[in-house]
Amino acid sequence: MSNEENIINFDEFIKVDLRVAKIIEAKDVEEADKLLEIRVDIGSEERTIFAGIKGYYDPSELVGKMIVVVANLKPRKMRFGVSEGMLLASGDDDSGVFLISPDDGAKPGQRVS
């Protein structure tokens, strides 16, 4: 299943800053079919992330959920605002989308390694 072109070395991987985050607010982006605007606490600060999970999660059910985010992704200016990270999820249109969550006890801002 691996593709030689997609193989990275450890030094490249370690550059990705994965952090535990707590969702503190989530709302629909009315002008977008797939986007939710999610506000997260990553320990040292709060960030806004736009995520294409609108059809899979009710925003009110996300508040308080612990997730994993890419914290050092370059902010991306979008029509609706600036996205300051990326949340990790798995799945597809057929099986659904599933947010990656840490075990109980994890705290916002903890590094995932």
Image (spheres, rainbow, N blue to C red):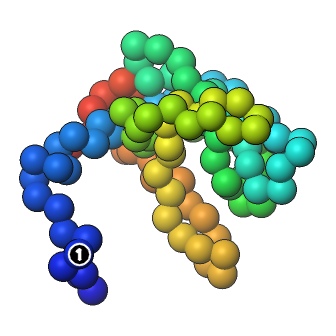
Residue located 83% across and 56% down the image:
33
Q: In the drawing, does residue 48 fall left or right of residue 74? A: right
Identify the element where label 1 is drawn. helix
43 w.r.t. 102: above or below: above
Residue farthest along the bottom direction in this orientation: 1
Q: Is residue 73 visible?
A: yes
The image quadrant where one finds the N terminus is bottom left
Q: Is residue 23 visible?
A: no
Q: Where in the figure is residue 63, as x and y percent of width and height?
A: 67, 33
56 w.r.t. 95: above or below: above
Residue located 46% across and 51% down the image:
88
Q: Residue flagged by tag 1: what amino acid is it?
A: Glu
| Location of mark 1 (residue) | 5
Residue located 40% across and 13% down the image:
44
Residue farthest along the left direction in this orientation: 10
Residue located 59% across and 74% down the image:
92
Q: In the drawing, does residue 91 fall left or right of residue 36? A: left
Residue farthest along the top direction in this orientation: 44
Q: Where in the figure is residue 96, as x and y percent of width and height?
A: 64, 71
Q: In the drawing, does residue 102 fall left or right of residue 80? A: left
Q: Where in the figure is residue 79, as x and y percent of width and height?
A: 76, 38
